[in-house]
Each structure stands twice: as structure tokens, then as C-alpha cells.
Image: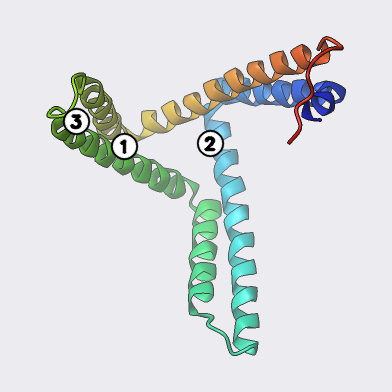
Amino acid sequence: MVVRLLEQNWWALALRGAFAVVFGSLALAMPGLTLEVLILLFGFYALADGIFALIAAFRAVERHERWGVLALEGVVSLIAGLIALFIPLAAALAFLYVFAAWALLTGILEILAAIELRRAIAGEWLLILNGLLSVALGLFLMVFPTPGLLVLIWWIGIYAIIFGGVMIALGFRVRHLPPHATPIHL
């Protein structure tokens, strides 16, 4: 009975939303600090991931199982974690350029798909527009990486605030469910 469970724990939804709003607000107010914290969190995660992958590789060696991919994954994760912790700007720029390349390539492929679709449907201009926006974003991030990082943090902050507001509203709405609400069984 999901509805009753949510109703009893409405405060958890609202609290989750409040934390998201606080995080989003801090991201907008202090984007540089937010970026640093996210990079540090990634760095510590990548180090832990690398250590666990290497442990799994050593255990695979003891069992005479394949271990090469695990060892490679562990080493790559350790290197990424060390870069994030000791050269955080390089980690931030690497993420930015990967994201920018993804946006650029996705945009180009969307434009090509729209050209193919024009034979089958009307309105392919929407996909072309989406592709052009993706290409523009990718080029903007590549040409202006520093403001691009700032924009990414702002997007994360805005998303967190909207997500948080929705969760708070959901929490209070679930709190005041009518007694005749139909329970949902999963």
C-alpha cells in the first residue's frame, strides 16, 4: 500500500525536497564552491571504486579467473580519482569537454535524422531545432569553457530547486490525503 506508506512518511518527501532546494540555492549562490565539492566527491568515489576493482582483480587471480579488465578498471578509476583530487580543474574541464562533444555529436545526428524524417513526416523542423540547440551548446562549451562550467552548475542548481519544490508539494499533498483514497498495490 504505497499511498499509506507515503502518507505516513510525508515528512520524508518534504525533507528531501527541502534539502534539494537548499542544495540548489547554494549551487546558484556559490557555483565555484559547488563545482569544487562535486569534483572532490567524484574524486573520492573514483578512488574507492578503483580500490574495490583492484581487490576484485586480485581475488580473481587467486581463483584463476579473468582479472585483466578488473585491474584495468581499477587503475583507470584510481587515476581519475587522483586527477580529480589533485588537479580538479583538469577534471572539471575533461567533464566539460566530454559533455560538449556529446552535445555537438548528438545535435549533428539529430539534424541528420530530421533530414531523413522529412520524407516521412511533417514537422521535422522541431528535431532540426533541437539539433541546432545541441550543436550551439556544444560549441559554446568548447569555445567558452569557464562560463560553460558555471552554466552547468546553474542548471544543476535550478533543477535541484524545481525538484525540491515538487517534492515538498508532494509531501504536503500526500499528508492531507482523504481517508477514502484508493490504495495502490505493487
Crowding at mark 2 (Cα within 10 Å: few <14, some 14-19, many 20+): some
Residue found at x 60% / y 86%: 61
Q: Are marks 1 and 2 in contact (CB under 8 Å)?
A: no
- Would you say 101 lies left or right of 36 here? left
Classify residue 177 by image quadrant: top right
Classify residue 141 by image quadrant: top left
Q: CA distance from mark 3 to mark 1?
A: 16 Å
Q: Which residue is mark 3?
A: 114
Q: Which residue is mark 1?
A: 103
Amino acid on which disc 1 is placed: Ala
Residue 30, horizontal then vertical, whole percent: 57, 25
Closer mark to the observer between disc 3 and disc 1: 3
- Under circle 1, the secondary element is helix
Closer mark to the observer between disc 2 and disc 3: 3
Residue 63, horizontal then vertical, whole percent: 64, 88
Q: Which mark is residue 35?
A: 2
Residue 179, horizontal then vertical, whole percent: 87, 12
Q: Which mark is residue 34?
A: none
Quarter placement of the N terminus:
top right
Residue found at x 44% / y 30%: 152
